[in-house]
Image (cartoon, helix red, strand yellow):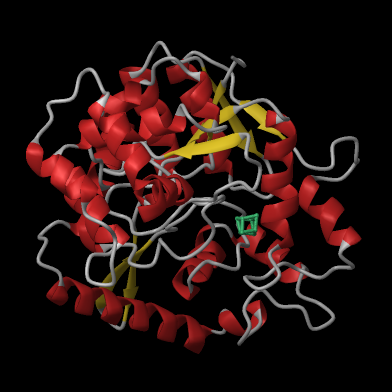
């Protein structure tokens, strides 16, 4: 059996930071290696978070930098190589060059379990590496497994193998309902998602035990592990839990998530940054650009400097246009209206569930 490495990437966002704390508190026996990919263009608050986490974890967080040996920072180095072509959602060379490639170099070809902080209240899949030696696990979700694993475990063609694995499990409680569900084939009227949810609703730990037994028959990294403590984890963590973990641990919520007040035409509003990552990230909302301009004007000016030869961060306007006084007023008012609409639509009385309505848009490698 090969030795399996357990790794956890710190993006600078709240969810991966909370996951690092959660894993240390709940699974202290797992020897997790923590890493972060530094683009050279993060806000100070991100570096502060890394320092606070290192103190809490009692471990160094390995700093991965693309273009090692270059005398420029990783982003500048690759920007030159790409002829000044700034990245965008359709030409996202930054994630590939500055985050994914350094990560894949770091883990090499050994079997690796990578823990990812996608929450139980999010409906998205994380980055799944094309390298078969890397397996992603999502401890905050009810379904801790990646999509490719679920596709295999629940496929009709693997059904008889999975059923006999279940029947041979030692610790199973053998609920007949569970077995009936397992035997039920996937059809247009009974989808894979329905089957998965029903199985998890019946017993998360029993479902996880089958998946683990199945993985032992494959080449997935977990096949090399005798036991895997997380199969008994039935906790599902949502957004409010993340803030609680960060506050209670003393690590703290990165300062850029804190809402700052502003006033427009005698009305009070608030803004904050909803994501980690590079200060000029093209995934940010217009109100976040205004936040950057007003809270970090030096960074905004630097972001403006990259806009030349027709390259812009936003498709529809330049950063110079975005900060014209009338435009700023419009963006702030529009944001206030959208928040007010959301408040009237949401049933939750908690501000935490109302704010940051589009934080899920963007890059799974950069904002978790
Ligand atoms: S944070 Fe945005 S700009 Fe930076 S690497 Fe990620 S996607 Fe690219």
105 relative to 111 in the view: left or right: right
In this rendering, the answer to whether 354 lies above or below 245 is below
- Does residue 284 show up? yes
Residue visible at 62% across and 16% down? Answer: 2
Closer to the camera, 295 or 360? 360
Q: Position of residue 223 (x, y in %)?
A: 50, 25
Q: Give the quadrant of residue 354.
A: bottom left
The residue shown at (78%, 42%) is 66
Compared with residue 67, is residue 291 higher up or lower down, i.e. above or below? below
For the point 33% across and 42% down, the residue is 160
Farthest top residue in view: 29
Asked if residue 27 is positioned above or below residue 11 in the image, the reply reads above
Q: Nearer the viewer, residue 230 or 115?
A: 230
Q: Quadrant of residue 194?
A: bottom left
**Where 106 falls versus 294 (above or below)?**
above
Q: Is residue 251 visible?
A: no
Q: Position of residue 290 (x, y in %)?
A: 50, 70
Horizontal and vertical percent for residue 47? 58, 36
């Amino acid at each position: 059996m090969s030795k399996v490495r357990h790794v956890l990437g710190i993006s600078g966002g709240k969810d991966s930071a909370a996951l690092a704390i959660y894993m240390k508190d709940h699974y202290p026996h797992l020897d997790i290696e923590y890493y972060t990919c530094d683009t050279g263009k993060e806000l100070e608050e991100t570096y502060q978070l890394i320092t606070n986490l290192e103190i809490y974890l009692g471990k160094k967080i390995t700093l991965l930098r693309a273009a090692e040996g270059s005398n420029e920072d990783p982003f500048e180095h690759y920007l030159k190589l790409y002829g000044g072509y700034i990245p965008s959602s359709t030409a996202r060379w930054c994630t590939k060059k500055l985050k994914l490639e350094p990560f894949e170099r770091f883990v090499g070809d050994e079997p690796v379990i990578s823990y990812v902080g996608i929450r139980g209240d999010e409906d998205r899949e994380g980055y799944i590496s094309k390298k078969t030696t890397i397996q992603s696990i999502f401890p905050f979700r009810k379904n801790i497994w990646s999509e490719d694993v679920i596709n295999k475990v629940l496929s009709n063609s693997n059904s008889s193998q999975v059923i006999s694995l279940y029947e041979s499990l030692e610790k199973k409680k053998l609920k007949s309902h569970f077995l009936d569900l397992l035997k039920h084939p996937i059809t247009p009227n009974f989808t894979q998602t329905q089957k998965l949810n029903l199985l998890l609703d019946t017993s998360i730990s029993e479902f996880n035990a089958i998946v683990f037994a199945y993985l032992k028959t494959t080449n997935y990294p977990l096949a090399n592990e005798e036991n895997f403590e997380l199969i008994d984890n039935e906790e599902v963590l949502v957004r409010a839990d993340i803030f609680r973990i960060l506050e209670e641990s003393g690590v703290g919520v990165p300062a850029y998530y804190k809402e700052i007040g502003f006033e427009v035409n005698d009305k009070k509003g608030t803004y904050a940054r909803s994501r980690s990552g590079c200060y000029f990230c093209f995934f940010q909302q217009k109100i976040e650009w205004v936040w950057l301009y007003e809270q970090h004007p030096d960074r905004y000016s630097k972001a403006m400097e990259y806009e030349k030869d027709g390259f812009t961060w936003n498709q529809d306007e330049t950063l110079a246009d975005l900060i014209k006084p009338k435009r700023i007023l419009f963006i702030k008012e529009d944001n206030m209206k959208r928040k007010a609409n959301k408040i009237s639509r949401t049933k939750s009385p908690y501000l935490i569930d109302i704010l940051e309505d589009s934080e899920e848009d963007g890059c799974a490698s950069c904002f978790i």
